[in-house]
Amino acid sequence: MVKNMLLLGAVLAVGLGVLEFAVRLLVPVRNVGPSFTIYDAEYGKRLKRSFTATRYSPEFTMSFSTNSLGFRGPETPNTPNGAILFLGDSFTEGYGVSDGAEFPAIIRETLRERGVAMSVVNAGIGDNGNGRWVKFLRDEAATHDPRLVVFQVHSNDFDDNLKENLFRLSESGELLELPVQPPGPARRVQTIIEAWPSLSYLHLVGLLRELPAAMAGGFSEPEQNRSANGANATQTSYRDRLALSLIEESLSICAHNRWPALGLLVGLEPTYNDLLKKLFVGFGFDVVVFPTRDEMPQLYYTVDGHWRPQGHELAAQMLLTKIGPYLEGGS
């Protein structure tokens, strides 16, 4: 009996090795490495706390770490001058670049060099929509005493709001918060894989992680360069109304708390840029529109679709030209 079990284990190990070799030889896997997130009963997911990992991709290798609060970057000091709070998706999180090269980190370092004593909180997380903004601003933001809130909006937020299902619109257009669903099969599989950390770095595991998104017709990250107004979308579609309502509610929370806000618009069609500009300006907030992939392809990875380090450098420069007035008295 023991001999048979050992034989079966050896056969499975050899088979796994053959499959892993075949995947590495024949299939370009988009990302290899452990998951950055865990299940969260309030948000659905959040970044792991005090976490360090490396992700491998055909286009880049990324060192990634979080602090004890589950934000990318070093521990966030409390300063009498408050914080610049960044909310957004994988572009704000800095997917595709190593620690220190994401635009919030570049802004943090630039402020330090200028002698500005202000903390920078990167609360960005990949593959999420705008409902998380509302919850975070309502429940956590005040603990960071925001001097400025920077909202990064990407075209795929519009679809991610539907997928996350944190809020819905009533027939009268009112935002209704929904209960967070319990962990699904993917989270249970993640738990099993992470019981043996080396499994996370198998290309075969990375490929399996991509299959659900590929079978659904695209990836959750923006390498497909999804547009906020696809072929069948209209300005008044439910998806669009939900996204705009969530963004408006986020801006309303900032206005109520007297937290200035700034928008960073990424990968949106002109119609949506105009809508969001109008929305931000209506609250007295400014907007920065980042060059699209068509306008400046050198800033984006060819296949993955995220920014190269040069994209983060440009985003930091564009934002720094706008945030000066909010730093008065912060040095």
Image (cartoon, grey):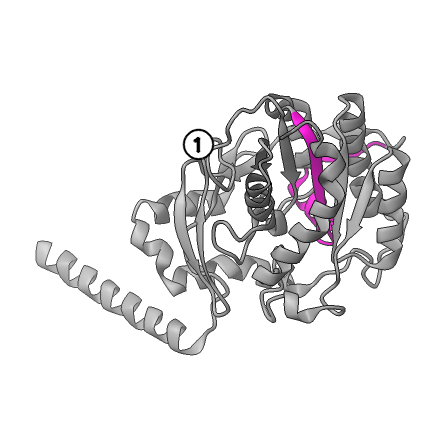
From where the camera sits, is residue 179 visible?
Answer: no
Per the image, the residue denoted by label 1 is 68
Magenta-drawn segment = 146-170
In the rendered image, residue 182, in percent from the top left (x then y), is placed at 54, 34
> Foreground residue, 234 or 244?
244
Residue 328 vertical position relative to residue 221 in the rendered view, above or below: above
From where the camera sits, is residue 303 visible?
Answer: yes
Task: Name the quarter where the N terminus is drawn.
Answer: bottom left
Q: Residue at x 82, y 57 (%)?
A: 229
Q: Residue 149 lies in magenta, yes or no? A: yes
Task: Name the quarter where the C terminus is drawn.
Answer: top right
Q: Is residue 22 left or right of residue 225?
A: left
Q: Residue at x 59, y 31 (%)?
A: 118
Q: Residue at x 54, y 38 (%)?
A: 45
User: Disc 1 residue type?
Assistant: Ser
Residue at the bottom extreme, as displayed: 26
Q: Is residue 74 left or right of residue 169?
A: left
In the rendered image, residue 119, in percent from the top left (x then y), is placed at 57, 32
In the rendered image, residue 123, in percent from the top left (x then y), is placed at 59, 38
Q: Residue 148 lies in magenta, yes or no? A: yes
**Quarter of the image where one finds residue 139:** top right
**Quarter of the image where one finds residue 268:** bottom right
Residue 135 vertical position relative to residue 29 in the rendered view, above or below: above
Residue 139 vertical position relative to residue 286 in the rendered view, above or below: above
**Quarter of the image where one finds residue 178:** top right
